[in-house]
Image: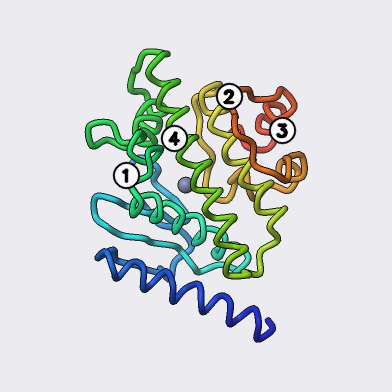
Amino acid sequence: MTCVKKNSIRKFINHVKRECEKVNVKFIMADSEFLVVEYRTRVNGYFDEDNLALVCAVKKSRNEWLPLLVHEFGHFGQHKDQRKVWKNSMLRGNDTSEKIFAWIKGQSFSPKNIKKYVRLTRNVELDCERRAARLIKKFRLPINIARYIQGANAYIYFHNYVLLRRTWYRVGKEPYTIPEIVDAMPTTLYNHYDRLPQKYVKLYDKYILQ
Ligand SMILES: [Zn+2]
């Protein structure tokens, strides 16, 4: 790694630390490959608004953990700014993504409600990815921005697929880490993601469906 790259990462991490400290959020770079949380069992990182913690599993290559940290810090930013999309995804104190995981595990919701939970969660992720892209540029992080956005699109579109197949991906099979899926994605973020193109359904079926 060159000095410039190391410096930009150090600056970014220091920024994350400072911003978290300002609002009493615990920032943890966990020396593990994944983290265990309610519903999802295993994840690579998370921002927890209830317990005020930003956690990222970093026992993996920098190319893997750095984009994840940028993404989770995007959620921290939404919380800090109290963005409308973020507030909308909190229904009476419940995170809409938790509703989706409960639904996958068998809990019943009306089709109208589950569609709403997916749309609200997807909008939060879209806003978060816009923030992440801005952070990558601002801190000149050693992340290929076009590739990052392709991965973001693979993740945002995946929410529609969840609605279709009532499933989630396993750690290690994230849509944004599967080259065949990422390659097929656009390199810009769209304003709307309501329609899931059939070609993506086929790719998710092939590479993610268990
Ligand atoms: Zn996210």
Residue 174 x/y as whole percent: 58, 46
Task: From the image, tell me which residue sits under label 2.
Answer: 194
Is the Cβ of the residue at disc 3 closer than 8 Å to that at disc 1?
no
- Could you say which quadrant of the image residue 4 lies in? bottom right
Q: What residue is rendered at 55% in x and 23% in y? A: 165
Give me the C-alpha separation between circle 4 and circle 2.
12 Å
Q: Which residue type carries mark 2? A: Asp
Q: Answer left or right for 42 relative to 184.
A: left
The label on residue 38 is: 1
Q: Which residue type carries mark 1? A: Glu
Give me the C-alpha separation between circle 3 and circle 2.
18 Å
Disc nearest the viewer among 4 and 1? 4
The label on residue 121 is: 4
Give me the C-alpha separation between circle 4 and circle 3.
22 Å
On-image quarter of the C terminus: top right
Residue 192 x/y as whole percent: 59, 29
Give me the C-alpha separation between circle 3 and circle 1.
28 Å
Q: Secondary structure at mark 2?
A: loop
Q: Residues within 10 Å of mark 1 (few under 14, many from 20)?
A: few
- Could you say which quadrant of the image residue 97 lies in? top left
Is 141 or 84 nearer to us in this picture?
84
Of callouts 3 and 2, which one flags the residue occurring earlier in the amino acid sequence? 2
The label on residue 203 is: 3
Is the Cβ of the residue at disc 4 closer than 8 Å to that at disc 2?
no
